[in-house]
Image (spheres, grey):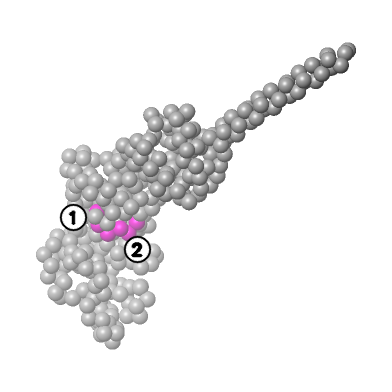
Amino acid sequence: MTEVEKQKMSTGKKAAIVIAALFILIGGYFALNFYKVYFAPNVTGNQKYLYIKTGSNYDALVDNLKSKDMLKSIPAFAAAAGKMNLANNVKPGRYLLKKGMTNRTLINMIKAGNQEPVKLKFQNIRKKENFAAYLASNLEADSLSFIQVLDSVPLISKYGFNQDNVYTMFIPNTYEMYWNINPVDFFERMQKEYDKFWNAERKQKAASLNLTPAQVYTLASIVDAEALYDKEMPIIAGLYLNRLNKGILLQADPTVIFANNDYTVKRVTNKLLQVQSLYNTYKYAGLPPGPIMMPSIKAIDAVLNREQNNYIYMCAKEDFSGYHNFAETKAEHEVNAKKYRDALNKRNIFK
């Protein structure tokens, strides 16, 4: 091989190497860009959840991501979103964000609507308005939307409830559901939970007490309000059932407090007893038209499994332990009541 041929071959090799290097560089550039767009960690972890409201579009989603600094690179997300057609597949919901999550993972999660369920735990909530506010603080819909459903006569009457007792449909427990559930679907989900709770055994026990499930719930709300300790619940339930069966006014202080809408009361005075309300069990016989709070399941079951006793009267113990003195006769009760009144006076508690 001549020197000229050798030089030509050397020049050709160099050219091939340069071309190969260029392809590697270009390929590397595109590979790196592809990695950054789809597979590089992009979620900052500054927010635990991404909330996409019902009716939101892609632009609103990007504005939300920007405003809350959820992503390291918005352009990289936008590039991936464009290629993966996110704009036409934005699904509302509450999405769990993990630090270092990639654009591809995030976009697939939103497109598939793979939400993180909300855990709702409710008990001892006093009124429908309070319940609606609690729901609104944990779900997408506002409190007014929930109230409108709870007060919707056509809807609630379909399931056998009215505006006074609809609250008895909500069995206190912990439930999982999606953040963007609408109020009607929420109501219907709770109605199914109600049906599951009121199984044949519980219904039979309620019937043996000559009470409907709604009445059991209402009585349980009074029992729960009276009992500081769970072990007293069946005793108190037995006492109130005795009064109901004998046609004696319940005279339950928590119902008077509810009727006066003043939960700072420590002593039910004669002035408070004058309130004109069907919830004032010092004036009106039988159970009030609805519950005075959302009772615990323990309170509901305490009514269904009440203690068989002959108590007619109860009074808080004078030691302020939270327990009660129970009595079968008015004379016994007057002794207990005087002890408690004297203890209140001694502590200057007059209202």
| Extreme-front residue of the structure | 4
Point 34% across, 56% down: residue: 123
Q: Point out which mark residue 233 bears.
A: 2
Which quadrant is home to the C terminus?
Answer: bottom left
Mark 1 Cα-neighbour bin, 10 Å: few <14, some 14–19, many ≥20: some
- Where residue 68 sits in the image (x, y, percent)? 42, 49
Q: Type of residue at label 1?
A: Pro
Q: Nearer the viewer, residue 6 or 35?
A: 6
SS at mark 1?
loop
Q: Type of residue at label 2?
A: Met
Point 50% across, 37% down: residue: 76
Is residue 65 found left or right of 224 in the rendered image? right
Which secondary structure type mostly characterizes the magenta part of the structure?
loop
> What are the residue bounds of the magenta stretch?
123-128
Q: CA distance from mark 1 to mark 2?
A: 21 Å
Point 16% across, 72% down: residue: 272
Location of residue 153 by image quarter:
top left
